[in-house]
Image (tube, rainbow, N blue to C red):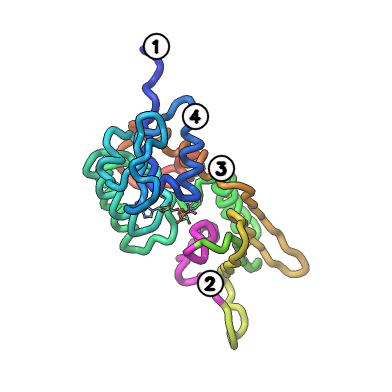
């Protein structure tokens, strides 16, 4: 390797045999500027101890998995993320977090770790979905308050959280564009005598079933017309490619909690 070529980015994959972990390992395998340096799975996973890539054994110990890594990429469960990000902060390993369904206290855990390491936290690493969030903000501003906004998301039946982190992120883009707080406007379920739709409500409905990796539709409902902005994922690969892009962006970055919008240059700060 010539002196000018940067060393490959060393990636630790957290939740390495999950649906997303599988795609992250494939994306790293395909990249010519990154290598897998570690892989973490749950204790008791049948592949623990196997050599899953040259020189890389699947382990159930976070410190061992993160040893020698530049960046960890994590798509797991909130409790796992909170435990592993602590280890990353102790060891100075940057972090890409795709886990959704994080509570306020889980987020506080990530914010504490971000005092010591750079972290990209995104409910959706798809480049197109992040462009969608940007367009949703623009459409909200351009159409004005007379258009009702409803968001519908569809995911595979094994998804554990609802509404999806992406749907909430899109709802936040609407609230931000209106200069409002999402928690005051969010209507995430309707049943029984709901009364008329409150003006300025931001509705989010979750559908579950089959093997769909994710669909999001944002409807701007006006009088006699509607605008729909739709993203449909056909595979999970683009999430992994986006996560790897975030991992590259983190190299040499100062500690802090960053968004995918920042990685893509769609927002500063
Ligand atoms: P999954 O259930 O297929 O994978 C999770 C993996 O984590 C499993 O392999 C499981 O064994 C492993 N795991 C459990 N405990 C562990 C531990 N203690 N240490 C290490 N690994 C452990 O789930 P998935 O479909 O891959 O989704 C994972 C998360 O990623 C979910 O929160 C999902 O919503 C989110 N997700 C985010 C994006 C995004 O772009 N941000 C995209 C897709 C999915």
First along the sequence among labels 3 and 1: 1
Vertical position of residue 47 compared to residue 52: above or below? below
Q: Which residue is mark 3?
A: 238
First along the sequence among labels 4 and 2: 4
Q: Nearer the viewer, mark 1 or mark 2?
A: 1
Vertical position of residue 266 compared to residue 202: above or below? above
Q: Which residue is mark 2?
A: 188
Vertical position of residue 16 compared to residue 165: above or below? above
Q: Nearer the viewer, mark 4 or mark 2?
A: 4
Q: Residue 121: x and y, percent?
A: 41, 49
Seen from the viewer's position, the closer of residues 205 and 178 is 205
Q: Split into 4 quadrants, where in the image is the C terminus?
A: top left
Residue at the image point whose x is 28% and y is 42% from the top: 117
Q: Split into 4 quadrants, where in the image is the N terminus?
A: top left
Q: Residue 21: x and y, percent?
A: 45, 45
Prevailing secondary structure of the magenta residues? helix
Magenta segment, which residues?
160-189
Q: CA distance from mark 4 to mark 3?
A: 13 Å
Residue at the image point whose x is 26% and y is 40% from the top: 64
Q: Which residue is mark 4?
A: 31
Q: Residue 20 vs residue 94: left or right?
A: right
């Amino acid at each position: 390797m010539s002196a000018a070529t940067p060393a490959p980015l060393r990636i630790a994959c957290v939740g390495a045999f999950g649906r997303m972990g599988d795609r992250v390992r494939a994306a790293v395998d395909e990249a010519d500027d990154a290598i897998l340096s570690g892989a973490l799975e749950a204790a008791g996973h049948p592949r623990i101890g196997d050599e899953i890539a040259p020189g890389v054994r699947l382990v159930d110990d976070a410190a061992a998995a993160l040893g020698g890594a530049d960046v960890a990429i994590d798509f797991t469960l909130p409790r796992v993320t909170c435990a592993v990000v602590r280890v990353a902060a102790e060891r100075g390993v940057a972090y890409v977090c795709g886990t959704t369904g994080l509570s306020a206290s889980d987020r506080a855990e990530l914010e504490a770790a971000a005092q010591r390491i750079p972290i990209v936290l995104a409910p959706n690493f798809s480049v197109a979905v992040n462009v969608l969030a940007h367009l949703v903000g623009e459409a909200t501003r351009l159409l004005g308050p007379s258009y009702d906004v409803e968001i519908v998301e569809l995911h595979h039946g094994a998804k554990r959280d609802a509404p999806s982190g992406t749907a909430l992120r899109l709802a936040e883009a609407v609230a931000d564009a209106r200069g409002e707080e999402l928690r005051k406007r969010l209507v995430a379920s309707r049943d029984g005598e709901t009364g008329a739709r409150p003006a300025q409500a931001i509705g989010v409905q979750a559908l579950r079933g089959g093997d769909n990796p994710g669909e999001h539709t944002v409807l701007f409902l006006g009088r006699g017309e509607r605008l729909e902005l739709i993203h449909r994922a056909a595979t999970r690969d683009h999430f992994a490619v986006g996560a790897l892009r975030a991992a590259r962006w983190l190299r040499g970055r100062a500690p802090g909690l960053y968004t995918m919008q920042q990685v893509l240059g769609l927002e500063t700060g």
